[in-house]
Amino acid sequence: MKQLRLTATQAVTVALMSLVIMGCATTTQPIQYQCERGTHLSANFSTDGKLVEIAIQDGAQLTLPAMPVGSGFMYGNGRYELRGKGKAAMWSVGRMATEHCIALP
């Protein structure tokens, strides 16, 4: 069996590429949001900021892609939308009125 030898530069490049690939799939600690009409959301943001995984208290789970925004964050898919800044967020479902939410400590 032939042994593979890498230069130091190649080894570092492989290691960094592995971290980037792994980083795309990892997520932060879930943030719990309590909304004004009783909706409870658990939001797990990807470390690269491209996706958020939402779990709703009724058992529904969905993944929303990031959307362009000037400040704060916004994720949505045309039906569901989570946007906010800091601890404050707004949750929208279809044509229903938007709920104001706050991140729990």
Image (spheres, grey):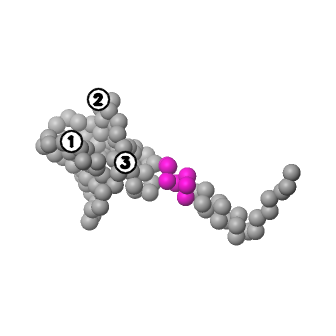
Q: Is residue 49 left or right of 84 when viewed as pictured?
A: right
x and y percentages locating residue 69 in the rendered image: 27, 62
Give the residues in magenta: 20-26
Question: Relative to 88, does residue 40 appear above or below in the rendering?
Answer: above
Q: Is residue 18 visible?
A: yes
Main SS category, magenta section: helix
Decide which of 18, 86 is in the foreground and name it.
18
Q: Which mark is residue 66?
A: none
Judging by the rendered image, the residue that carries numbered circle 3 is 52
Judging by the rendered image, the residue that carries numbered circle 2 is 58
User: Is residue 23 one of those drawn in magenta?
Assistant: yes
Rendering quarter of residue 11: bottom right
Question: Relative to 102, does residue 18 appear above or below in the rendering?
Answer: below
C-alpha separation, residue under disc 2 versus residue under disc 1: 14 Å
Q: Quadrant of the C terminus?
A: top left
C-alpha separation, residue under disc 3 versus residue under disc 1: 15 Å
Q: Is residue 73 left or right of 15 when viewed as pictured?
A: left
Q: Residues within 10 Å of mark 3 (few under 14, many from 20)?
A: many
